[in-house]
Amino acid sequence: MREHSDIVVVGGGPVGAAFALALADSEFSVQVLEARPHLRQPTFRRTLALSYGTRLILERLGVWSALRKVTPIRDIHISQRGGMGVARLSATEEQLPELGAVVDYGELDAALHQALANSAVQVVTGARVVDSHSTTTYASLQMEYKGRPECVTTRLAVIADGGAGQANRERREYAQHALVAWVKSELPHGHRAYERFTDEGPMALLPDQDGFALVLTALPERVNALLAMPEADFLAELYQHFGERLGRFVQVRERSSFPLATSHTRDVVSPHRVMIGNAAHVMHPVAGQGFNLGLRDAWELAEQVRASGREALGDMVMLKRYAVTRQFDVSASMWFTDSLVRLFTQPNPLLDHVRGMGLLALQQMPPLKHFVARRMIFGARAW
Ligand SMILES: Cc1cc2nc3c(=O)[nH]c(=O)nc-3n(C[C@H](O)[C@H](O)[C@H](O)COP(=O)(O)OP(=O)(O)OC[C@H]3O[C@@H](n4cnc5c(N)ncnc54)[C@H](O)[C@@H]3O)c2cc1C
């Protein structure tokens, strides 16, 4: 561990690791502090839907080609249960090879860390940061490292710890839990992802290998009942819930659940300290946008750091410039996802009609559809 580095990244999850990698060949010394004792140990199993824009960034970081379990998404089918209107987004219409792809969080994490291991960036595992302080010229970070307290200093502390344990956050609870699982259907996915809004909550089926990654949201009691069901009953319930587009569901594994909430920090930047990724904002998972947004934070911050030069590293002029650049993408993404979830989960027959008209309008108006697709793929750069 270095006592002082130009940049210290707290958290070597995919956002922190990508940020460090983006600066691996820069003039700055970069150190990553990661709480996990070993890198090949993600805290959970998770699949991520990555937009095509995210793929382009990962290609530039040199890690895309290392991913083996990649399932392309070529179409997205959006519908509501019991209501009219269907919208379809397609890669062909957007003149792209694909709209996005589904990858495994653990594999992405491993690929990023393999690239870091071959770079000048120092990654310290088993280092849990517990406190930080800033002066006008540097930040200091206190941590627990192998059972003893340690401290490092830096010109720029980049907090990418996923938001774990931060008190100063705006938090909004949804009265729902999410159930995640891997499922297989009778009919093949044909590289199509499904977003379906039901009066119980939205659900997503993302093509993953020869099946789907499922995210289903509902009231906690309902999710608990679905978790406890024997496999055959669960598959039958899922068929009822989703409808017959994919035939029957024939296999399920790795069912788990968690409560749904979104949150964001009030102070993304303070002297010599900045938050990125989930540390700055946690989104509803059903739209599959959290990591995509976090990676855009990482990429933009790396660009600002390169442009700032050594003297301005971590000062408030540089950090505010970063915050302003990111503000629109972050707030628009959070607002869009939150509004979509709220609009489509109000059990109101009148709203059913409005929602159906909305989906029809999206389908019938190519410029609107093109805009929504570009917004999902490239974030604020779609403008
Ligand atoms: C079920 C589910 C499905 C999702 N699906 C998608 C999707 O399809 N597409 C998408 O874009 N996003 C998705 N997301 C969101 C996505 O997982 C997150 O946005 C992404 O993981 C954020 O990355 P991160 O690096 O900011 O944080 P994390 O992935 O949480 O990583 C944080 C890292 O910091 C480390 N750490 C924590 N505390 C400390 C500390 N004190 N000191 C040092 N290190 C620390 C942790 O060990 C971890 O390695 C999903 C989320 C969920 C829950």
Image (cartoon, rainbow, N blue to C red):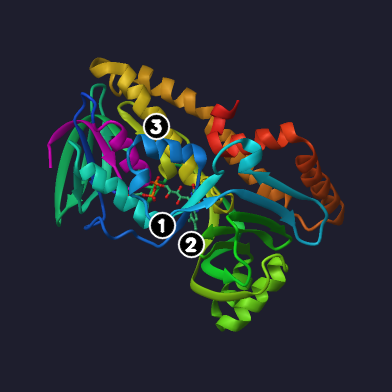
Does mark 2 have its CB less than 8 Å from ligand 1? Answer: no
Residue type at mark 2 is Gln
List x then y, in percent, for residue 186. Answer: 62, 72
Viewer-nearest of labels 2 and 3?
2
Closer-to-camera residue (134/230): 230
Answer left or right for 120 relative to 34: left
Q: Which residues are magenta?
A: 1-24
Marker disc for residue 69: 1
In contact (CB < 8 Å): disc 1 and disc 2 = yes
List x then y, in percent, for residue 352. Answer: 82, 53
Identify the element where label 2 is drawn.
Answer: loop
Tell me which corner region of the image, top left, top right, bottom left or bottom right, holds residue 228.
bottom right
Query: Which residue is found at the position 19% from the left and 30% from the top?
Result: 29
First in sequence, mark 3 or 1: give its number. 1
Q: Residues within 10 Å of mark 3 (few under 14, many from 20)?
A: many
Q: Is residue 369 found inside the magenta-colored segment of the image?
A: no
